[in-house]
Image (tube, helix red, strand yellow):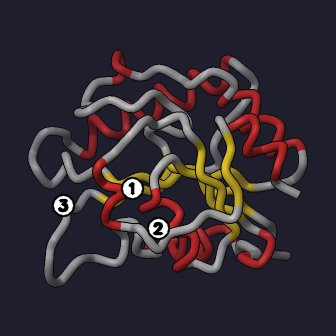
Amino acid sequence: MPKPAIFLDRDGTIIEQVDVLNDAAQLRLLPGAAKAIAGLKERGYLVIGITNQPIIEKGLLSHEKLQLIHDALQHMLEKEGARLDAIYTCPHQYRAEGQCNCRKPGTGLIEDAQKEFAIDIEKSWLVGDRLRDVATGRNAKLKTILVATGGVSKDDEFFPEAVPDYRASDLQEAAALIS
């Protein structure tokens, strides 16, 4: 039976934004993020992280080191009673032509999760801190929430048409909006 899911951008939504996050020691959970994730799981949602990590293709982070970072993130969440069901990553850089479908705003990461978990897309949401995330959610036919925890980004200029369904100050407020 399909289950609804909450897709969460990683950087700036769950953890503090870092320019080049390539070591688990740089991880910092955003205040209230673990509590929000635990609450969503208690309400029966799958909670799935999705993240663009072009630093892999740039050679600044290996797949193995990324796995260590994600293991450390899960450990931090578990210490606060939360856990992500999965984390999907696009390792590719931006390409003007021939862009992969897994790089947000493409929907490949969401499609992969849908295949693995039999997700009910009509009852699912995407929460992120960038208009790129909102565009991803829109492209995947998800309801969207833009959180203000990631700070300002020039990247948002590339997605002026991406209008979220809701706005929230942080992941906790976003979780409260999800019905």
Q: Is residue 14 left or right of residue 177?
A: left
Residue at image x 27%, y 40%? 64
Tell me whether the residue at label 2 lies in contact with that at label 3, contact meaning CB atoms closer than 8 angstroms: no
- The numbered mark at residue 89 is 1
Task: Tell me the residue that label 2 is attached to.
Answer: 109
Indicate which label's residue lies in the foreground, 1 or 3: 3
Which residue appears at 67% of the width and 50% of the height? 167
Residue farthest to the left?
A: 59
Judged from the image, the secondary structure of the residue bearing numbered disc 2 is helix
Asked which secondary structure carries label 1, the reply is: strand
Q: What residue would you read off at disc 3?
A: 93
**Label 3 element class:** loop
Residue 42 percent across, percent down from the top left: 88, 42
Q: Quadrant of residue 65?
A: top left
Whether residue 176 sits left or right of residue 116 in the image: it is: right
How far apart marks 1 and 2 lie (CA) works out to: 7 Å
Query: Rounded to the nearest whole Å, what is the CA distance between mark 2 and mark 3?
Result: 15 Å
Q: Is residue 73 above or below residue 112?
A: above
Which residue occupies the foreground of this view, 44 or 146?
146
